[in-house]
Structure formats: structure tokens, C-alpha cells
């Protein structure tokens, strides 16, 4: 009888595990595109290609982030980013850095033992994994070698680094289970470190705030990052031919691509996404310097390259398989992609995949005559480079971006425009809807545009998202009726300037069109919140025009800083109390920013005041609306101590008013006039009642509502349902 091997000790297995992780995750795969023959099966070394990613600061500007600094300042981080922005790459390189840091102790992560847990695999299990099942859930072949209880002991000691990748890759209905499972882990092992990644639109920034997770968002690559990634890509490509004629040719292509991307704003914007930049490199090399113009063209080119051209040009064929043409492969893949998209999945088991292919084969008679569903799926898995196996009996698309591209193509071909409109408020469908505009004909685009606009008019909860989506669709549609285009642009103007980070990010999805609508620094306080959100939007859009706008805002801030004397450490509020509607000339000359009014006559020096005042506190019986309307800089208004004030009917002319605080106005029972203003922040005291507060639902720009919670019953949950998209801040300080 063969003697069984002795189980490894914790220390011995830990050494083996760290070596395995350092090698297993030190790789990059790009849909089967080969850089060098010896990397055709296992991808390319991540250490050779990794470029420091960038994150957005609170001001909307981007800074570089290294894997070792992801957890700097804390042990819990939610990483959000656009498709292809490098979330998984960052997570894998963090795992590699942690595994190597255990050896060298010179890395920020040297105390951690990494566990990479892909959510798409976790969601397919019967119950989410317990610690002992982590390695098996991640699909690691050494899972059965681990000592019993080893993972639990690592986590209990606070040495675990849990890298949970891709919350967006399960259906929205399953994310609550993922969150609950994560909460149990945090309760059981609070000393461990956690990094969770997701697409930006899938979950809010505060999704894990209950457990004190900080949140960062990945930014596009800047010009230096793009140049570095292209340089690294070609360095790896030419490594085996450095001194040969082929090596010189590859270096020429590298220089040509660098010059082309720098000189073409559309390609510069495309290359700011790490995935798109890598695809550009692959396509540029494969096509000997010819590049596509748009994201849709790039997807088309890559798909053609992967399905047919790459093998045909290299003379490669699949042993034992008859060649399947490009169009049948595309039809089969988009059939699978559309099924996954409609069912909110990223993977499908092989038996169902065979059934889906069997259902489509009768419409592909040339393929059906010589192939079975099993042989067709085997061909697609082996040769297309589009599919990958997450488990022995399950497959999914290697990239969610290509799943979206193919699903959009299928939706348009099947005439499912109504379905696209119905799902347009779902973040998982946003990319599909945008790409559908690119696949659709002119009449279909018009139908899709009008359907989304009509729905936005009926659905206040999704209005902003839908308006931004139709705006972004203008960048994909080939032909748009001028009147319809103007209607869409007018809807976008209502969202500009952006007032919150979410609005800024959503507007950036529209692309360069928004740059024509964003305000200049001359029209905004360069240090104010709207200026910061405008800069954030431009930063996300990228390109020369966006960079020029950001530069102008930065210059305006410097000019203002040079003019304004730095205040003392604890300055007194800058205010002028006006008792008789007259102001001492010396105080006006000082340029007050805040003005207190208590009378009823117009100040004799109102025009001079209006040049500097942006904050007014009014106390009295009748609001001086005619006076306030002559203050073009007025941004903040306090209405105080007015027992007779019942409504806000005179606020409509105050176009630039953004913050309104009402205090000591107990007779106020009508807030409907706010629907005609641009008020973003509203605070009301005393509380006029839930029914009165609910009337602000038509104030489209309102984002924050503060109020005291009265004694007795108060339907806070009902008010929340009445005001979708508005953050409620009860006076108790508990954020609802």
C-alpha cells in the first residue's frame, strides 16, 4: 500500500502558498492575444507591464497610487472604477506585493497574507465560502494541501488580507448576500485588512461605510501613464527580438503609436483606460500601425482579430475542428452574451451553454451540418479568446466589456429597444445601452433616444441618470436629428454645473460634448463646490480641451489666492450688520462676503454690496426679494425669525442660490416654490411636517435636506421614499 504524504505544517504550507501566490497572480491576460510564444498560455508578467494607477482626490484631481499604499491609513478600502480601469490588476498586484513582502519585509504589505476572492466564483457556490474554503473558492490547485484550520488561524491573528474582486459581477439581488457575508467576516476577524473592488455604478461610495471602509475611485491614466503603459507593452513585445530587425520594427511601431495617441484627442481619451490602451497596443501591432477611431471600432477590430484574422494570418488551425467563420462565431457569442445580460449573470454552466447553442444552430445551417453544440462550444473556448472557465463546469466572458458589446448587438438585431429603455436605469445595463446606439441604425437611434427621454419625464428617481445616458448616446449614434439633438443638449444644460460628485461622474460619461457646456472659471467661485465638481468632470473626460479647462480653473485659484489676504487661524465671520439699510463706506470697501439685513428699505449702496456679497442673513417680516434678486453672486440665504412667513414664492428669480436655511419661521407650510430654483442644500427648522417636506420632490436640483426630528411620530421612511435621490439629514445627526 502506498504511504500517504505527511500533512504540511502551518509554516511550511505558508511558504508554499506565498510562492504560489507570487507566481499565480503575477500575470496579465488579454483575450488570448500573444505577446511572445512562451507566454501564450500563461499570459505576460504583471511586473513587466504594471503601471501605477491613479485615484481621484476629494477635489476631483488625480494622484498616483501604488499597491502598497492602497491600505495606507486604514485596513478597509472600497475601490471603485469604470470597466477596464484596472481594478483586478490592482488587486492582483497587491496580492503579489503582499506575498513578496512577506519575504523582504520592505513593503507596506509585508505583514499580510493575501487571499484573492473573485466574487463571480463566490456567487455560484451553495452558500458563500467559510475561511477554510477560500482557496477552493478562488480555484487554487493547492487548496487541498492546506493544514486543517490554517486560514482561520491566519485570520484570527489579524494577518489576513482579503482581496474581494468584482462585486458588480453578480446580479444586484445577490449583492446583499455578499455584503452580509462580508459583514460576518469583519465581525469575526476585525483585525484583518480588506480591499473590495466594484464598478463605480454598481454600489454607492457608502456601501460599506457601516464597517468604516474608506473609498477610493480609480481615475483615467494621464498622458504620462499612457506613455509608460505603451512603452512597457512594446518592451515586453520586443524582448525576444531586441537586437534583430523585428525588434527595430517594433520600436518604430511603439514610437509611431506614442506620437499618434498624443496627437489625436479621441485616441488619447480611449487610451486613458488601461484595458483600452492595452487593446490599442495589440491592435496597432497586429495591424502594422493602423488604428480604429472609436471604442466601438476598437471592439469590432479586436473581435475580428480574435475570431478569424489572427489565426488565419499566422496559419494556425484548431486540431480536429472545422473552421467556423467570423459571422457564425459572432452570432453564437452574442447569443450567449445576451442571455447572460438578460439574466444578470456573468457565468453559465456548460449544460445550459450547450442548450443555448443548440437552440441557435438551426439558424446557422452551414455550422449545424457538421458540428454539435459540444464541439461548437469547445471551438469557441479554445480559439475565440473571448471565453474563459471560472470553474471546470462553468464559462463566462473574459471581459465584461465584450459581453456588453455583444449583448448590445444582439438586442438591436432582435429589436429589443423597449427592453433597453426599461433596463436603462440599471448600472449593469448602462454600457449595453450606450453601445446599442453604436450598433443601431438612424431610425432605431431616434426611437431609443425618445424612449429614454419619455421615461425620464415619467420617472423622477432615474431622471438624472437617463438624461446623462441620452447625452452620452450622442457620442455613439452616427446620425441624430438636429431638433432631437438640441432637446438632449438642453436636458444636459439643466445638469450643469454639476453640484455633487455623482453628477460630475455621470456627466463625464457623456464625453467631450459636455466640455462645450461646462462654465468658465469666470462664472464660478474658483474655490467653491461647483468649481470643484466642474474640474472633476473635466478630469474624468480627459483630452487637451479638458486639460485646458482644468488649467484655467487652477490659474483662477492662484489669482484669487494672490489677491485675498490669508485669514488668521480662527477668523471671525466676515459680516456687516445693516440695521437701517445703510452701510459705512469703509466696510463696503473691505468687500464683505456676508450681509445681515433687518430693515425694509433698499440700501443706498446696494450695487457696491452686490459686487462682493454671496451670503445674506435676513431677519424680518417680509423677505426683500427685489433686493436679493439684484445680487448676482448670492449663493447662500438664511431666512430667520419670521413668524408670518408662509411660503417661498419670491425665490424663483434667485438663479444662483444654492444653499437655503430657514429657521424660526413656524408658519411656513408651502415649499413648492423651490421647484423653480437651483437650491441644492436646504435646512428647515422647526420641522413643518413630513407632508410639507415631501413637497420638495419636484425641486430637481435638491440633493440634501436637513431638519429637526419632532417629538412623537414622524414617518422618516415614508419621507425617504417620497424624495428619491435626496439625502436626508435629521437634526439628531444620524444620516438617513
Image (cartoon, rainbow, N blue to C red):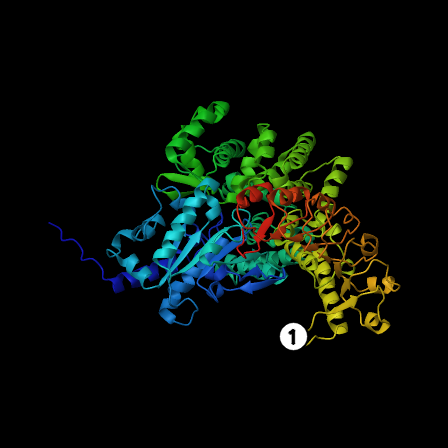
- Residue 494 shows in this picture: yes
Secondary structure beneath label 1: loop
Instruction: Tell me: 528 left or right of 418.
Output: right
Q: Residue furthest front?
A: 643
Task: Return the x and y of residue 283 as percentages of the image width and height.
Answer: 57, 48
Which image quadrant for residue 600? bottom right
Q: Which of 209/225 is in front? A: 209
Query: 567 and 442: which one is in front?
Result: 567
Judged from this view, the residue extending furthest toward the right is 604
Q: Position of residue 392 (x, y in %)?
A: 35, 41
Residue at the spot of label 1: 570
What is the count of numbered marks? 1
Foreground: 670 or 58? 670
Give above or below for 115 relative to 392.
Answer: below
Left or right? Give the position of 307 relative to 103: right
Q: Residues within 10 Å of mark 1 (few under 14, many from 20)?
A: few
What x and y, as percent, mark residue 82?
56, 50
Amino acid at each position: 500500500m502506498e504511504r500517504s504524504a505527511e500533512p504540511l505544517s502551518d509554516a511550511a504550507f505558508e511558504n508554499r502558498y506565498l510562492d504560489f501566490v507570487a507566481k499565480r497572480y503575477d500575470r496579465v491576460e488579454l483575450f488570448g492575444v500573444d505577446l511572445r510564444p512562451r507566454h501564450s498560455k500563461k499570459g505576460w508578467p504583471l511586473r513587466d507591464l504594471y503601471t501605477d494607477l491613479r485615484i481621484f482626490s476629494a477635489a476631483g484631481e488625480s494622484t498616483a497610487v501604488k499597491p502598497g499604499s492602497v491600505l495606507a491609513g486604514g485596513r478597509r478600502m472600497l475601490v471603485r472604477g469604470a470597466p477596464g480601469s484596472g481594478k483586478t490588476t490592482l488587486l492582483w498586484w497587491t496580492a503579489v506585493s503582499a506575498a513578496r513582502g512577506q519575504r523582504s519585509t520592505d513593503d507596506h504589505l509585508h505583514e499580510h497574507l493575501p487571499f484573492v476572492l473573485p466574487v463571480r466564483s463566490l456567487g455560484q457556490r451553495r452558500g458563500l465560502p467559510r475561511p477554510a474554503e477560500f482557496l477552493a473558492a478562488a480555484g487554487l490547485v493547492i487548496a487541498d494541501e492546506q493544514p486543517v484550520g490554517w486560514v482561520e488561524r491566519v485570520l484570527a491573528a489579524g494577518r489576513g488580507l482579503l482581496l474581494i474582486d468584482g462585486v458588480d459581477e453578480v446580479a444586484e439581488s445577490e449583492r446583499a448576500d455578499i455584503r452580509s457575508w462580508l459583514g460576518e467576516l469583519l465581525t469575526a476577524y476585525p483585525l484583518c485588512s480588506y480591499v473590495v473592488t466594484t464598478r463605480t455604478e454598481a454600489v454607492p461610495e457608502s456601501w460599506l461605510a457601516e464597517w468604516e471602509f474608506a473609498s477610493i475611485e480609480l481615475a483615467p491614466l494621464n498622458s504620462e501613464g499612457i506613455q509608460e503603459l505603451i512603452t512597457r507593452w512594446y518592451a515586453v513585445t520586443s524582448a525576444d527580438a531586441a537586437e534583430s530587425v523585428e525588434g527595430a520594427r517594433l520600436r518604430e511601431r511603439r514610437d509611431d503609436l506614442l506620437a499618434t495617441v498624443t496627437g489625436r484627442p479621441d485616441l488619447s481619451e480611449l487610451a486613458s483606460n488601461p484595458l483600452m490602451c492595452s487593446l490599442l497596443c495589440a491592435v496597432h501591432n497586429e495591424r502594422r500601425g493602423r488604428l480604429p477611431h472609436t471604442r466601438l471600432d476598437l471592439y469590432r477590430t479586436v473581435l475580428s482579430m480574435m475570431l478569424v484574422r489572427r489565426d488565419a494570418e499566422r496559419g494556425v488551425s484548431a486540431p480536429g475542428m472545422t473552421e467556423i467563420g467570423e459571422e457564425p462565431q459572432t452570432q453564437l457569442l452574442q447569443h450567449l452574451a445576451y442571455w447572460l445580460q438578460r439574466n444578470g449573470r456573468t457565468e453559465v454552466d456548460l449544460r445550459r451553454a450547450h442548450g443555448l447553442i443548440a437552440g441557435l444552430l438551426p439558424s446557422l445551417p452551414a455550422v449545424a451540418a457538421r458540428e454539435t453544440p459540444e464541439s461548437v462550444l469547445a471551438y469557441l473556448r479554445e480559439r475565440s479568446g473571448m471565453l474563459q472557465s471560472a470553474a471546470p463546469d462553468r464559462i463566462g466572458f473574459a471581459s465584461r466589456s465584450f459581453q456588453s458589446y455583444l449583448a448590445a448587438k444582439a438586442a438591436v438585431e432582435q429589436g429589443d429597444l423597449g427592453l433597453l429603455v426599461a433596463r436603462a436605469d440599471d448600472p449593469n445595463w448602462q454600457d449595453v445601452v450606450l453601445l446599442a446606439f453604436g450598433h443601431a441604425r438612424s431610425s432605431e437611434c431616434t426611437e431609443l433616444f425618445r424612449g429614454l427621454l419619455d421615461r425620464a419625464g415619467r420617472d423622477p428617481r432615474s431622471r438624472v441618470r437617463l438624461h446623462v445616458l441620452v447625452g452620452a448616446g450622442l457620442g455613439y449614434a452616427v446620425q441624430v436629428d438636429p431638433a432631437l439633438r438640441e432637446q438632449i443638449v438642453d436636458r444636459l444644460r439643466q445638469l450643469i454645473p454639476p453640484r455633487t460628485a455623482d453628477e460630475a461622474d455621470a456627466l463625464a460619461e457623456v464625453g467631450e460634448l459636455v466640455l462645450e457646456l461646462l462654465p468658465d472659471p469666470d462664472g464660478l467661485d474658483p474655490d467653491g463646490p461647483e468649481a470643484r465638481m466642474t474640474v472633476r468632470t473635466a478630469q474624468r473626460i480627459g483630452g487637451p480641451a479638458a486639460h485646458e479647462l482644468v488649467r484655467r480653473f487652477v490659474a483662477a485659484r492662484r489669482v484669487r489666492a494672490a489677491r485675498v489676504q490669508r485669514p488668521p487661524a480662527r477668523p471671525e465671520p466676515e459680516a456687516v450688520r445693516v440695521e437701517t439699510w445703510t452701510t459705512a463706506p469703509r466696510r463696503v470697501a473691505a468687500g464683505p462676503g456676508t450681509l445681515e439685513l433687518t430693515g425694509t428699505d433698499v440700501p443706498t449702496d446696494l450695487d457696491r454690496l452686490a459686487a462682493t456679497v454671496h451670503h445674506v442673513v435676513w431677519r424680518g417680516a417680509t423677505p426683500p426679494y427685489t433686493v436679493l434678486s439684484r445680487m448676482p453672486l448670492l449663493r447662500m440665504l438664511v431666512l430667520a425669525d419670521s413668524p408670518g412667513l408662509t411660503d417661498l414664492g419670491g425665490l424663483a428669480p434667485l438663479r444662483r442660490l444654492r444653499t437655503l436655511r430657514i429657521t424660526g419661521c413656524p408658519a411656513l407650510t408651502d415649499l413648492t416654490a423651490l421647484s423653480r430654483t437651483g437650491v441644492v442644500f436646504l435646512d428647515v427648522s422647526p420641522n413643518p411636517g413630513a407632508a410639507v417636506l415631501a413637497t420638495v420632490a419636484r425641486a430637481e436640483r435638491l440633493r440634501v435636506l436637513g431638519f429637526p426630528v419632532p417629538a412623537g411620530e414622524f414617518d422618516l421612511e415614508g419621507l425617504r421614499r417620497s424624495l428619491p435621490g435626496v439625502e436626508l439629514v435629521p437634526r439628531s445627526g444620524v444620516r438617513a
